[in-house]
Each structure stands twice: as C-alpha cells, then as structure tokens.
Amino acid sequence: MTTFGTGSPPGTAELLGAASAHHATNRDRLHLVPSENGLSLAARVPHLMQAAVRYAFAASEATSENWAWPGQQDLLAVEQAATARLGSQLGARYVNLKPVSGVSALTVALSALASHGDVVFNFAERDGGHGSTRFIGTRLGLAMQDLPFAPNTLTIDLDALSDRLRGTPPPALVYLDAFMCLFPVDLAGLRNVVGPHTVIHYDASHTLGLIAGGAFQNPLAEGADSLGGSTHKTYPGPHKGILATNDTDLATRLDEHASYFVSHHHPADVVALAVAAAEMDACGTAYAHATIANARHLAAGLAEHGFTVCGQDSGFTACHQLWIDIAPLMPAEQASARLFEAGIVVNAIPIPHITAPAGLRLGLQEVSWAGMGTGEMDELAGIFAAVLRDADAAASKRVQALVEAFGPTDAEDAVLRVALAAAGGGGR
C-alpha cells in the first residue's frame, strides 16, 4: 500500500533548509519592528497538531455535535475559552475569531458596518492610516473621506472635524485605522462631534496587547462601538484577526459578514491565540506597562544622544511605537541598513508629517515580551548612537550580548531540531 504525503521527496531538505537558515539568522537579530512579536513555544505547537488540517464549525445549538463536520468539539471548546479570555481582557461581550488577519478583520468591518454609498471617514495614509482601508472601502462602494489630522498633536483634529460636519449629515462610520500611532484617540470627544448614530470602529491591530493589558485606552469603554485588528503585534499571538463589540446588533452583522468573507478560520491559529490569551492573563498587565515604559525610556535616551524623536512635546509616545526623523543624519534606508548589519531590524518607512520621505519606526513590544527593561533601553540608545553616529563596528557585539541574554530558549531550538529531523530537513 502506498501512503502519500509521507517521507521526504526530492527538494524537501532544500526547502526546509532555507526556512531553517532564515530562522537561524533571525533568532540572532534584535527585532524592533512594531508589527511583529514573539510567539511562545506553547503557542507554536498547535501548528504541528491535527488542528492545522481540520475544519471546526459549531452546530446551531452550542451543545450539539455538528454532523456535517463531526468530531471537532475539543477545538470548539478551545475557541470558546479563547473568546471568553479575550472578551474579559477587552471588555467585550462578543468576540469573533473568524478573521484570519488584520486586513481580513478590516474588510469584514467595512462591509458589515457601512452600506454601499455611505460616507466613511478614516485616516489618510499621510496621517498614518493603513494603506488597505481606502482601497477596500472604495471597492465596497463606500464614499471614503479623510479624517482631519492635527500635526502638532499627531491625532484627530476634532475642531476641524466639527467644522466640516456643520450643516451636513454625520458619516455612517468612522474607521480608526492608524497603523502609524503614538497617542490615544479622544474617543469621547469624537463621539460628541459625530453624534450617537455614527458607528465608531477602532482598529486595534497595533495596540491590542496594550489594551488587553490595561496600559492603553479602552476603546469599547470610551465610546467606540466595535474594535478589531490583528493578534500578533502588541498582542503576542499568531497571525490572525479579531472583532469585538458590546452591541448585539453589530455582533450579528459582523458575524454574518465574517461568515461570507472567511470560509475557514484556521483552528490551529485559534488554539495558538487561546494559549496567547492565557499567557496575557498571567502576565499581560506587567508586559503592557513595561512595553510603554520601554518605548518612552528609549525615546528619551535617543533624544539625549541627539536624535530627532517625534512627539517630544507630548512625551514622545504613549504606546509601543516611537518614530525617529533620521534625515538630519542620513537617509532612513541607509540608517536601517547600518542597523541591520549590526543585528537590529527596524522599519524605514514614511513617517507622518516629517519633511523627509521616510524615517525610522521602532516598536518595543517584542523585546519587552522577551523581558527587557529600562536598563536595556539605555544600552540600546547607546548602540544606536554607536552605529548611526560613530560607525562603530564593535556595536554588533553589544547587540549580540542582548540577543543572547533575551533570545529564544534552548527548548525552542531543541523542538525544532527534532521536527526537522523527523521531516527529513536536517538540523540547524
């Protein structure tokens, strides 16, 4: 009898070897990208289980077996546990885990919360809005408009918004999609301007873990009708999406549209997210506060070393991100390349309202999740100065010292070696 899909066909070792090489080089770097985070060994394990290849659809009666897709009750119980934990962390009665990514959640939210022809406000890309929002909204037939933005405070200009809406109907939806963010949104003020009938959706892709840890604003308690986003940035989970609300009607609409846009919501990722949610219950509050403290401390340290850090008049940042206008010293791409050579990964990316085409965007969530504190932020500030101002080649040794102190555990590599050997991909 022939069993297909077993053994190691030609090319397998090369493919796994390339991925293993990527793993090895990236585990030896310090990652300061705001849209990434670590994922614990426990949260990675579900992708080696049957959950990675099975569908899991609940029956119409929650306690009944779905005989069209039988035998998935254990996975459904894990999903219920995940939604309960996330609901508690976010202050949400309804949590939907059907989106498979942040953009998936974005698409569902735009479709469910506004109708063809409705006016929808979101952040312009130049003000830090996500590049997909306007495209997807327009394709859905929505009349997308820019939220007024105040460059001095790096947030919504509520006075300008009030002036624009005077004498005109309010928008059907305000979609708060800042992927470039430093400070909270005045949600109570926004609600006062747009009135009670406009739906306010808060895209928490970047700040979800800070919200869950009680260190950032709580959107659903402050005036947002719903929130959504990805679960792998400040939230230390898998690449997946989430939607949440306290409104029964909105929950029904979101679930209906999610059911059409997403045919299968990846049970292995759901299990991984359930594990991450349990981890956040255990240490999320300390982690979230440490992340913001680290971001502020590093920002102040960089400023002391002479770097131009955005938002200084407002305390630099209130979340995990900080932005450096590096143009007075060198182009952002050159700065990113120098840091990469030294073992540090950062974004060279357009920064709202700086003169240069791009600056450096840093995120402190991954190193904070790994356990770094303000002492390490002092060292990082010094390393940035050594790399970008002094061109000190020895700075890479300082980076490696941090990586070795706070990098992945030996247990993670041991599991990987066993898995690679079993799959015929060799070891690291």
Image (tube, helix red, strand yellow):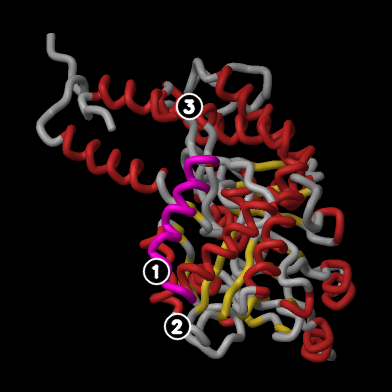
* Marks 2 and 3, the one that precedes in the sequence: 3
Q: Amino acid at mark 2?
A: Met
Question: Is 425 part of what is drawn in magenta?
Answer: no
Q: Main SS of the magenta segment?
A: helix
Q: Which dot, 2 or 3, sits closer to the camera?
A: 2
Q: Looking at the rendered structure, which numbered label has been put on residue 46?
A: 3
The magenta span reads 389-405
391 falls in the magenta region: yes
Q: Secondary structure at mark 2?
A: loop
Residue type at mark 3: give it. Pro
Whether residue 53 is visible, yes or no, is no
Whether tag 2 and tag 3 are in contact, CB under 8 A, the answer is no
Q: Where is residue 184 drawn, in percent x and y?
A: 77, 66
State if disc 2 and disc 1 touch (CB < 8 Å).
yes
Residue at mark 1: 338
Q: Position of residue 288 (x, y in %)?
A: 72, 48
> Which residue is the extreme one toward the top?
1
Point out the frontmost of discs 1 and 3: 1
Where, by quadrant of the figure, is residue 391 drawn?
bottom left
Q: Which mark is residue 330?
A: 2
